[in-house]
Image (spheres, helix red, strand yellow):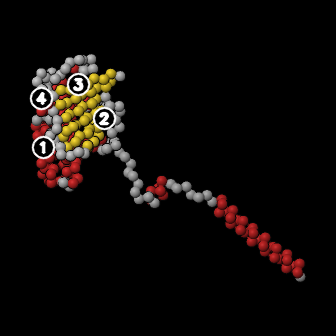
Amino acid sequence: MKLHLAVSFLLIFTGCALACLQVNGSAAASPTPTPTPESIDKGKRNVRPVSKTLTDEQISRSSGEVVAGTPAYFYEFTRPGFSYSPVLIEHDEEGRGKISFVKDGSEEKITDPIALSPVTLGKIKRTLSALDFLNSNENYQYERDYSNLGDVTFTVRKEGRERTVKYNWTANKNAKDLMDEYRRIANEYTWLFEFNVARENQPLRTPAMMEAFSGFLRRNDLPDPPHLIPYLTAVSVDERLPLITRNHALKLIKQIKKAG
C-alpha cells in the first residue's frame, strides 16, 4: 500500500514538472517583438519633423542650416554712431557665410547666416576680377579723407595668397562698386533681422519697415531684389501681420517683377 502511494505521488510530481517545462519552453521560444518605427512614433509624441529642402530665404534666416566652406571674402564697415557698426561679412566661394553687427546703443553682437544669390556673388567676383585684386598694389583711398562716412576694409584669401585694403572714399569705379555691393548686402540682412524680430514680437511695426524696404528698392540699395521675392510672398500671406503690411508686400513683388 505504501509502495503504491509512493509510485502515485512520483507520477504526479513528474507530470507537473513536465508541464512547467513546456510552459517555460514556450515562453522562451517566443522572442520579444522588435520595436518598429511606427510603434516608436506612437509612444513618442515629440518626434522631430523630417527636414525639407529650404529656399534661399529660409537658408539665409535659419541658423545652422547654412553649411559654409572656408571663408575667402571678408568685409568690415566701421563708423561709430551709425545704426549698425561694426558690420562684418564673411563668406566662401559659394556665397555662404555669416554677417555680424552691433546695433547703435547696444553692446550685443548679432550674428546671422547668409547665402548670397548667384547674381550678387557674380557681381562681386566680376568686380574683383576687374580690379585684379590679388595682384594689384593700388591704394583705392581718395586723396581726401572721408572717414565721417565710415571706413570699409576688404580682405580676400585665395590659393595661399591674401590682400587687405582699407578706404572710405575712392575715385576708382570698381573699388566703389565693391564697396557699394557689400553695403547693399548689409542693408538686406540687417533689414531681414529687424523685420523678423518685429514679425514675431511687434507686428504693428512692420508697416513702417515695409516703407523702409521700399526706400531701399527705390534707391537701388539692395543687392538682388528678385532674390527676396520668396520672402515677400511669405509675408503677404502671414495673417499675423497687419493687412497694410501684406498688401505692401504684394505691391513690392509686382514692382520687382516689373523691373526685371
Q: Amino acid at mark 1?
A: Ala
> What's the mark number on residue 165?
3
Q: Amino acid at mark 2?
A: Arg
Disc 2 from disc 3: Cα separation: 22 Å
In the rendered view, tell whether residue 175 sits above or below residue 21: above
* Residue 175 appears in view: yes
The residue lying at 18 percent from left, 24 percent from top is: 175
> What's the mark number on residue 212?
1
Indicate the quadrant where residue 215 lies.
Answer: top left
> What's the mark number on residue 146?
4
Label 1: few (<14), some or many (≥20) within 10 Å?
Answer: few
Q: Does residue 49 appear left or right of residue 256 in this picture?
A: right
In the rendered view, tell whether residue 240 sits above or below residue 224: below
Q: Which residue is mark 2?
A: 96
Disc 4 from disc 3: Cα separation: 16 Å
The residue lying at 50 percent from left, 54 percent from top is: 36
Element at label 4: loop
Q: Amino acid at mark 3?
A: Val
Q: Earlier in the sequence, mark 3 or mark 1?
A: 3
Indicate the quadrant where residue 123 lies.
Answer: top left
